[in-house]
Image (cartoon, grey):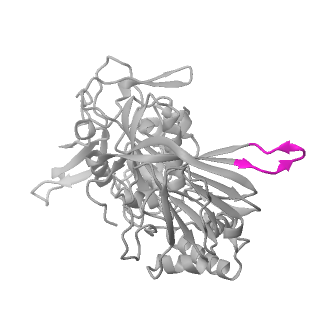
Amino acid sequence: MQTKYRVRGHTWRSIQCNKSIPYNIDCTSCGELMLPMMGLFCECCAVSACKLCHRIVDRQFRCKQITSPEGKPFYHHWVNVGTVQSENVDQNEDLLKRYYCTWCQKTKLLTDTPVADAEICDFEKYRSIIIPPACVQFEKGMVTIKHPGDNDWEPLIILANPKSGSNRSDEVLSLFRGLLNPIQVVDISSTSPEKVVRWLPTKCRVLVAGGDGTVAWVLNTLLSFPHVKAAVAILPMGTGNDLSRVLGWGTGGNSQLDAHSIISSVKQAHLQCLDRWKVTITPKRRRLGRLRQQRVLYAYNYASIGVDAQVALDFHYARSQFLYRYASRTLNYIAYAFLGVGRALDDGGCGGLERRLHVWLGAAADPLTLPPMQALVALNIPSWGAGVDLWSMGTEDDVAEQSINDGKLEVVGISSSFHIARLQCGLAEPYRFAQASSLKIELEGSCAMQVDGEPWMQGPSTILIEPAGQSLMLRAKIKRTE
């Protein structure tokens, strides 16, 4: 695993950024009061510097070490984070320097006497979730994590995707690097989850900051390494965040991120199993005389064919071309709304979908009778399209209970993009077909398809959706407020 955190050298952020650690508003090198536009602080160790002096501070002051020699005492890492006046505010000599340990979050007040380093740090506040530097070993480019010996030790690993819809995951990386060992906080756009999971401890908790696609990526990776028993929590940073809503982690609209509150929520969360579904797509047409290769995907939220996937595909193209630079949840919703309106006038080839689909539920011998529609959705969770509960909404009739770990899919149909808009406003009902333990679909012609919000254009094919085990999630003890 490549990491840019070394013994020396800091990772600087503007003092205007959201933070979880204190810092000094006076430059550590020249002592001048820093204006917001000129002030910097290290997101890992809290040392501060102005833009003119930060290279000097890089050479003079050591940042947090992600690894240290095993068997040797580990001392506090004290950083001067400002001054405090004593009770007699009229005397300048009563100004005390405030020192902060970047590992255990302890503070102490001292006079001009330099703080003593020879005091052992026990990581106090977050001892049960921090990977101690002495437990981290690098050998031939490989990372090894040793257990510190505490029975209640269950480290927290932060995996954030800065390319997610809200573009705020970079802020998450900065917040948690100041509280944990920086090796625990990973940007998965530059270091893939596959590289990280290889060195994870057998038992840990993983916080994924991203959208539904990022969560699915991490869950698939964890199931490829069965020796790691990791439970996954979600910090919603995408546009829809359907799985996050179901598990009580919120919708992702929070304007202020509080790292301490997030850590507390993850530590108190309950274990929750989540069904996993294997989606096998077998193309019918040949390409240059060769049969196209079979494609295998895994679904946790839902899989759909039709106009909803077409709108998602339109948005995907728009974001990749010009929206990504200005990404925000509000802009994403506006873009989705406009693209949905456009598909009310042009169905994108999804009209008369019932004539091109043949659907078998479970082991049924006869295909399902379909009404006129433009989309077929197979649901695993009670949230679709950014919070719409399709299966149980808008009816007084008795419907079977929906569960995320009962080994069943809920199959519904949607008539048009206008129908989608009415569903999101609670003014309509979907076509509710049945619950099924597996699903077989024969698709004639081409149509947009999506799995957990990741869309593409699908040609004629046979699509089989069947159970593929379960993933271990974390359900928030109390629903997070936005």
Does 72 appear above or below 456?
Answer: above
Does the magenta-highlighted stretch encompass residue 144?
no
Residue at the far top: name it.
71
The residue that appears at 51% across and 44% down in the rendered structure is 467
Q: Is residue 290 magenta?
A: yes
> Can the viewer see residue 15 in this picture?
no
**Numbered circles on residues, count:** 0
Of the 4 image quadrants, the one containing the C terminus is bottom left
Quadrant, the N terminus: top right
- In the picture, residue 227 is in which quadrant? top left
- Residue farthest along the front direction in this orientation: 365
Residue 269 or 305: which is nearer the viewer?
305
Q: Is 420 left or right of 315, judged from the image as shown?
A: left
Depth order, front residue of 264/403: 403
Q: Nearer the viewer, residue 419 or 430?
A: 430
Residue 166 x/y as whole percent: 51, 63
Q: Residue 117: horizontal and vertical position, in percent? A: 27, 30
Q: Is residue 293 left or right of residue 246?
A: right
The answer to whether residue 120 is above or below residue 81 is above
Q: Is residue 210 above or below residue 1?
A: below
Residue 327's spot in the image, x, y percent? 57, 66
Give the residue furthest to the left: 87
Q: To which quarter of the image does residue 449 belong?
A: bottom right
Q: Nearer the viewer, residue 433 or 101?
A: 433
In the image, residue 62 lies at what x, y percent? Answer: 41, 35
- The residue lying at 31 percent from left, 24 percent from top is 148
Magenta region: which residues? 282-293
